[in-house]
Amino acid sequence: STEVIAHHWAFAIFLIIAIGLCCLMLVGGWYLGGRARARSKNTPFESGIDSVGSARLRLSAKFYLVAMFFVIFDVEALYLYAWSTSI
């Protein structure tokens, strides 16, 4: 048991510091954060322009298909570039 502790003491200290830092940031954000919960505080700032309509619009499936093809061919181009530079 003491042999295991002696072998992994650095990792234990790292883990304690990491958890402590996360807790410190969470408590600090809660403590320093604003307390106002008015409706005007929850609306996004639109650079002084009043919002028009809803942001919840339904898009056609063809836009989704174009986006998927873009991602697929972009990743394929990335692999082809890496392969061509390694030759």
Image: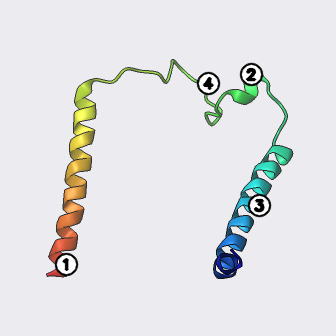
Residue where numbered disc 3 is placed:
20
86 lies above or below 59: below
Secondary element at tag 2: helix
Snapshot quadrant of residue 59: top left
The nearer-to-camera label among 3 and 1 is 3
Residue where numbered disc 2 is placed:
39
Q: Is residue 1 left or right of residue 33?
A: left
Towards the viewer: 38 or 12: 12
**Label 4 or label 2, whichever comes before in sequence order:** 2
Q: Quadrant of the N terminus?
A: bottom right
Snapshot quadrant of residue 15: bottom right
The nearer-to-camera label among 1 and 2 is 1
Measured in 3D between alpha carbons, the distance from the residue under mark 1 to the one under mark 2, in whole angstroms, is 55 Å
Name which residue type carries label 1: Thr
Q: Quadrant of the C terminus?
A: bottom left
The nearer-to-camera label among 3 and 4 is 3
Kindly identify which numbered label has been placed on residue 85: 1
Residue where numbered disc 4 is placed:
50
The reply to whether dot 4 and dot 1 touch (C-beta < 8 Å) is: no
Kindly identify which numbered label has been placed on residue 52: none
